[in-house]
Image: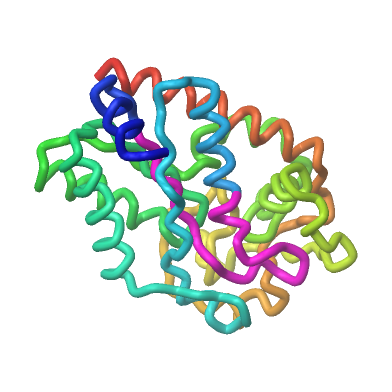
């Protein structure tokens, strides 16, 4: 888009979705841009369905120090990530946009995008949204999944299914393996989130290379393009619904 098209969209009251993710290892079978690619594709599909949404260029890099034990991971500092998102939102605000949604595709960014949304309310008195794409359709994903709890963590059934649907040619299915575990205590401490849909009540620092030597947390062996297509469709539909509700605020 050129500047006049963006100005016209702003004056029409269009909303903006800001996809964020990471560049990090996703096991031996998925590309390192899995997180941001999924978030960006979902954002674009929802925008096409609505017609009143702009999709910001994606924020490729995220907070991924726990993946630095593997080649291909590029992480930025916590404060760098927070400041980058704040500056992007502030730039949009200065151009007149008042409704923004940060759409996340990386678990390591989850808490940070919430901080940005809360801080933006403090500094600008403007309510922006923050969400991770899998949370938007958590119930639908529970109904679609073939793995037991612990099967959706990282480079797992969920992410592998989505990538099989979006770009099968970049998935090396010969390298998948089931890598699940049982938490070590009743609080769910396991040096990593047990499951994307059941993250537990306790957070503990961990190094992925120590906790999951293959770079996988979950069960990608049951992943399928069919599941991926249904997950993407469900998330897009819920995102469209969310944006409609947001527009009415």
Q: How is the image coloured?
A: rainbow
Residue 18's place in the image compared with 50, above or below, is below
Please state if 216 lies on the left or on the right of 107 as rendered.
right
Q: In the rendered picture of this protein, how many numbered marks are placed on residues?
A: 0
- Dividing the picture into quarters, in which one does residue 63 lie? bottom left
Is residue 129 visible to the viewer in this orientation of the structure? no
How far from the left and from the top, in percent, is residue 206? 49, 76
How far from the left and from the top, in percent, is residue 55? 43, 39
How far from the left and from the top, in percent, is residue 194? 58, 58
- Dividing the picture into quarters, in which one does residue 25 lie? bottom right
Tell which residue pokes out farthest to the right in this image: 174
In the rendered image, residue 53 lying in the magenta stretch gets the answer: no
- Residue appearing at x 70%, y 56% in the figure: 156
Image quadrant in which the N terminus is located: top left
Q: Magenta stretch?
A: 16-37
Residue 45's place in the image compared with 187, above or below, is above
Please state if 236 lies on the left or on the right of 175 as rendered.
left
Give whichever of 47, 2 is nearer the camera: 2
Give whichever of 4, 113 is nearer the camera: 4
Image quadrant in which the C terminus is located: top left
- Residue appearing at x 66%, y 64% in the figure: 217
Give whichever of 138, 19 is nearer the camera: 19
Please state if 185 lies on the left or on the right of 89 as rendered.
right
How far from the left and from the top, in percent, is residue 111? 36, 55
Give whichever of 11, 121 is nearer the camera: 11
- Residue appearing at x 43%, y 56% in the figure: 59
- Dividing the picture into quarters, in which one does residue 224 lie? top right
- Residue appearing at x 68%, y 47% in the figure: 158
Is residue 159 visible to the viewer in this orientation of the structure? yes
């Amino acid at each position: 888009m050129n500047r006049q098209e963006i100005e016209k969209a702003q004056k029409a009251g269009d909303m903006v979705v800001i996809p964020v993710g990471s560049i990090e290892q996703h096991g031996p079978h998925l590309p390192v841009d899995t997180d941001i690619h999924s978030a960006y594709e979902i954002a674009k599909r929802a925008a096409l369905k609505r017609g009143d949404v702009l999709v910001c260029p994606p924020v490729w890099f995220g907070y991924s120090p726990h993946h630095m034990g593997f080649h291909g991971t590029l992480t930025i500092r916590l404060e760098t990530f927070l400041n980058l998102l704040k500056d992007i939102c502030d730039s949009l605000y200065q151009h007149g946009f008042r409704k923004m949604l940060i759409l996340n595709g990386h678990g390591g960014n989850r808490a940070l995008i919430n901080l940005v949304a809360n801080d933006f309310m403090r500094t600008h008195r403007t309510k922006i949204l923050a969400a991770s794409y899998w949370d938007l359709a958590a119930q639908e994903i529970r109904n679609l999944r073939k793995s037991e709890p612990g099967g959706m963590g990282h480079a797992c059934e969920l992410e592998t299914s989505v990538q099989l649907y979006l770009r099968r040619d970049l998935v090396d299915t010969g390298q998948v393996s089931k890598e699940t575990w049982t938490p070590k205590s009743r609080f769910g401490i396991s040096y990593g989130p047990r499951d994307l849909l059941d993250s537990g009540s306790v957070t503990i620092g961990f190094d992925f290379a120590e906790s999951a030597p293959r770079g996988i947390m979950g069960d990608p062996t049951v992943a399928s393009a069919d599941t991926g297509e249904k997950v993407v469709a469900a998330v897009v539909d819920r995102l469209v619904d969310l944006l409609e509700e947001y527009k009415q605020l």
